[in-house]
Amino acid sequence: MTMKNRFKSFVPYGVIFVVLLFLPPVIPRFYTYILTSIFVTALLAMSLNVVVGHGGLFQFHHAAFYGVGAYTFALILTKTSLPIWVGFVAGPVAAAMAGLLVGWFCVRLTRLYFGMLQISLGSLIWAIAFRWYSLTGGDDGIHGVPVPDFVTSSTSAYYFILILLTICLVVMYLILRSPFGMTLQAIRDNPERCEAVGINVRRHQLLGIVIATFFAGVAGVLFVVLERSVFPDLLFWVLSLEIFIMCLLGGWFTFAGPILGAAITVSLRTFVGIYTEYWTLILGVMLILLIFFLPEGVMGFITEKFGARPERVYQER
Amino acid sequence: MGLSRAMILFIVTSGLSFVLGVLRVPNVAHGSLYMIGAFSAFSISKLFGGGPIGFWLALILSPFIVALVSLVSERLLFCHLYQREHLMLLLFTFALMLILGDLVKLTWGAEYRSIMAPDFFRGSVSIFGLSLPRYNLFLLVLGPLVAIGLWLFTNKTKIGKIARAAAVDMEMVGAVGINVSWVFAFAFVLGCFLAGLGGALVAPTVSITLGMDHDIIIEAFLIVTIGGLGNMWGAMVGSLIFGLTQSFGVLFWPQFAIVFPYTAVVIVLLWRPRGMLKSVW
């Protein structure tokens, strides 16, 4: 792709970003909240896609790291008197440490076994958060986290989260386009050959997991900024599966697909949830329709239809 | 206590393992079918006045109801997807889980339900000086019976052998003129039948509620993995490990009881990454 083409492909994103910048004053506060919530979920789904779509790993319990980030941030704000920036740094770092630890075990295994080991390790983290009442508040979680003043209003939280999301997306994009990111994708497509040309497959996968879990931790911190509470459901495997679905739904071989998947899921939950409590039924039906008619995901469908070159085809090993 | 829990886990996971072995699909909706089994056991036993007849009928009929549900969803939707990527199949079963979960909510509502085991199962018997609730004893007998039945079925009957062959090499089975699609349908329905049976069996021992699908499915997956994917005896070993560590945890450190089985799973997977027994994969 030439420089000009590459620039062109950024234009839609730039337009969306500018539109989002001017939205809060003109739309009702409820929608501002929904959009912010979509941003947080989108960042989470994007971070998962670093290892799922681009790394080909069965990261089945990504929410555990999201929860670790959120809990660390909330605990530092409520239980200690450390300055706030420590919390902002510690959340993602703690998530990345957890990712390193879990990943260190997981990269020894492949595919489904990898996923299962991760589910059990992630469930361990969940069980601790769920049961350690004195620290984490158990199944009640922690509510009323005193977030700093500059994000207390819904509009300022919106801008704060939008800007952090944008920074994270740019960094993720650069990482995925870097030699490291390319190697990760090469490993996804053919691990044996990569091993043969002297790439340390496991170390690359582990680094991929650490990067992904770091951004999941950022998403966790942003969740607390938005909701001011944490609870064990953040680390429950159902959420992990849900974000996995978002990646597939949006199109996991595209860069921006997971954002779309997150947007679809969150808005479905919100707007269908207003009319009926059976929103998961609707989501299930939509998923089935999608599987039958748009196997490449919504974003994959869009890129295919509207000219852009299809991204690389996944090969089942 | 731990053993009888292990037996229920075994009945559920052997079904999951069977589906996984033949279809190569981790059926996320398995837990929902288990839940449907429990709820329909409740309805049937209520229909017959909650007496012993209702209980036995519930035990016999609800697995068939579950099997019917799974047959319908398989023939209507799932059977068109077998050529697709694995993750798509996983996604499908997830969608099925969402749909079935809400259908259960629509049908039975969100309240807690419970059914009583008949008088015959009340009280306990003492064996080797241990006092054991009768219902648990019943489960302890039934679990191995199901295991033997399943083993006889897959090893001694023609259709069972075909299913096992399809697990190993699906294309070859198709090449010798067997309708693979129906073999898959059959395996799926049988697996779901076992989920329903597990649900009906667990019904008298727990409160039947929404969300029980989420609890069981993750345990079932881990058990199948540590046992060896698709291996029925592996499911038995895995269930025993899981059930026993769970009750061990309840006994010694109740607050963190749920940590024990997960830790056991981690240890097993690190020690034997492919599961305890040979996997069909």
Image (cartoon, coloured by chain):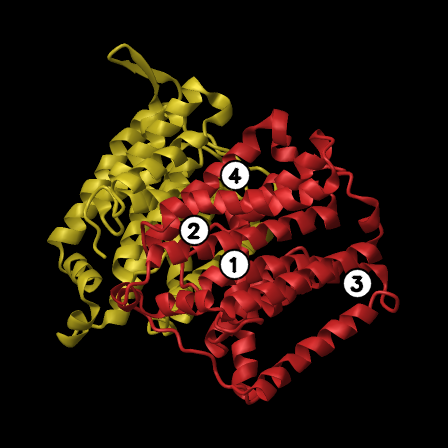
Chain colours: A red, B yellow
* C-alpha gap between disc 3 and disc 4: 31 Å
Q: Chain of mark 1?
A: A
Q: Amino acid at mark 2?
A: Leu
- Residue that badge 3 annotates: A31
User: N-terminal of the two: label 3 or label 1?
Assistant: 3
Same chain for the residues at labels 1 and 4, yes or no?
yes
Q: Residue at x 23, y 41 (%)?
A: B276
Q: Residue at x 62, y 67 (%)?
A: A170
- Residue that badge 4 annotates: A126
Give whichever of B86, B182 is nearer the camera.
Answer: B86
- Residue that badge 2 annotates: B33
Left or right of B102 on screen, residue A185: left
Q: Quadrant of residue A11?
A: bottom right
Same chain for the residues at labels 2 and 3, yes or no?
no
Q: Amino acid at mark 3?
A: Tyr
Q: Quadrant of residue A197?
A: bottom left
Q: Are marks 2 and 1 in contact (CB under 8 Å)?
A: no
Q: Amino acid at mark 4?
A: Trp
Q: Are marks 2 and 3 in contact (CB under 8 Å)?
A: no
The reply to whether residue A35 is in sight is: yes
Q: Chain of mark 4?
A: A
Q: Residues within 10 Å of mark 1 (few under 14, many from 20)?
A: many
Q: Amino acid at mark 1?
A: Leu
The answer to whether B146 is drawn above or below residue A306 in the figure is: above
The answer to whether B93 is drawn above or below residue B273 in the figure is: below
Same chain for the residues at labels 3 and 4, yes or no?
yes
Q: Chain of mark 3?
A: A
* C-alpha gap between disc 2 and disc 1: 29 Å
The reply to whether residue B40 is in sight is: no
